[in-house]
Amino acid sequence: MATGHFKQGIAGGRLSPEQYADNFSDLHPPLDHHEALVESDRCYFCYDAPCMNACPTSIDIPLFIRQISTGNPIGSAKTIFDQNILGGMCARVCPTETLCEQVCVREVAEGKPVQIGRLQRYATDVAMAENKQFYPRAAPTGKTVAVVGAGPAGLAAAHRLARHGHDVTILEARPKAGGLNEYGIAAYKSIDNFAQAEVDYITSIGGIDIQNGKALGRDYQLSDLTRNYDAVFLGMGLGGVNALRAEGEDAQGVTNAVEFIAELRQASDLASLPVGRRVVVIGGGMTAIDAAVQSKLLGAEEVTICYRRGQEHMNASEFEQDLAAANGVTIRHWLQPKRVIAEGGKVSGIELEYTAMKGDKLVGTGERLTLTADQVFKAIGQSFVPAALNGSGALLALEAGRIKVDAEGRTSLANVWAGGDCIFGGDDLTVSAVAQGRDAAESIHRALTSNGRA
């Protein structure tokens, strides 16, 4: 055990450099050429394949796998990128175990699906390593489109619009493009600065200008965009973090899980990142798992996830839950936070209440449990912050706190589309955001070419 592992409180340098490097190595090492051929041979190349129907971007999965099996990874990559220009990242972060691989005929028959995600990564990695560009840009149309947010939805929309010859300006609030791919995904899922390599690959088509440090409502208004551009696409994601609604949550040591993950992704020295000795994560989704596992990998001694409902209700997939368990994370169910216990302003524990279902309603039982902790992570979801829109003087229709759109991604405001996590009905998946950005771009293109203005 490395010296410093049992430092009290929140501290860095709990592990040796070798342990950090090993802990944050690639979660799913890439397939080599031979492994890809062997795995592709397991595919039945189904007609009306259930895996393709389960893919939010409708990639022709049997075709791309057949192309790998015949020694044509470049052709395979084109099949993937035709539907999903962020296919490289989606291959790394998509919960394939609950999408394409869950319905794979091999999974249903044998309990061992074709490794679709790893095959997708193999093909896209080959194409990106060779910087193989499949899409020439159409002749410039003279039309301009503003894209708010350089996350998966914004990048997918921008690439498709640029393909059609429109000039795209992406306005991104953060210092780097990529959105959650850059700031919100566990470090072991995307190593070697892949998110930025993908941004460079996407923007190399030309006609896309990314301006960083530009926040809607602070540096410009939506009314500015609708006045100065022919169309606008909103893909700014979710900026708010839901509160625990527990007494004492302002104590030092209570942290937003998304901020912790972002800080970790941007860190050049993992040893400099402080983490608690005993960590409690509140939540049941992918963010909760990512924060918990990475806390353990940074050297936390005890990490516990507390979720207010049962295992079957968790948004995190079974694979992610198993990953947490394999890394020594304890997951406890039917517990909700009531009070953060602090000593000298710093977290020393958390008091939780047991919960139960009463009819169709979740209720507290009155029975309490206290866990010792010096760090508590909030991972109970994010919310859309509409204030930036309201400052424009042009109110968009919202539904359940997010932007309301039609089937093509059109908002209630003329010439404005939206997609990704900021829209009502989104499922907070990278692959779904890509599909929404791509489809909204096609709708914008039709509008711009039919009457000259969206």
Image: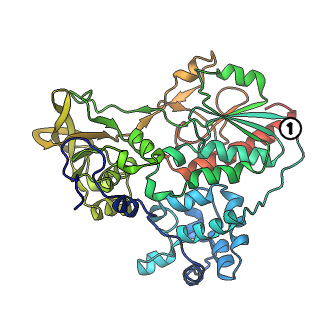
Apparent side of residue 387 relative to residue 434 in the rendered image (left or right): left
**Residue lying at 73% horizontally and 29% vertically, measured from the top left:** 415
Apparent side of residue 403 relative to residue 157 in the rendered image (left or right): left
**Residue lying at 73% horizontally and 24% vertically, measured from the top left:** 226
**Residue lying at 62% horizontally and 78% vertically, measured from the top left:** 45
User: From this viewpoint, which residue is outermost toward the right?
Assistant: 139
Apparent side of residue 120 relative to residue 298 in the rendered image (left or right): right
**Residue lying at 65% horizontally and 77% vertically, measured from the top left:** 68
The quarter of the picture where the C terminus appears is top right
Residue 381 is situated, as x and y percent measured from the top left of the image, at 39, 39
Q: How many marks?
A: 1
Element assignment for label 1: helix
Apparent side of residue 234 relative to residue 421 in the rendered image (left or right): right
Q: Please, what is the three-letter code of the amino acid marked with disc 1?
A: Ser
> Taking the image as drawn, is residue 339 in sight?
no
Residue at the disc numbered 1: 450
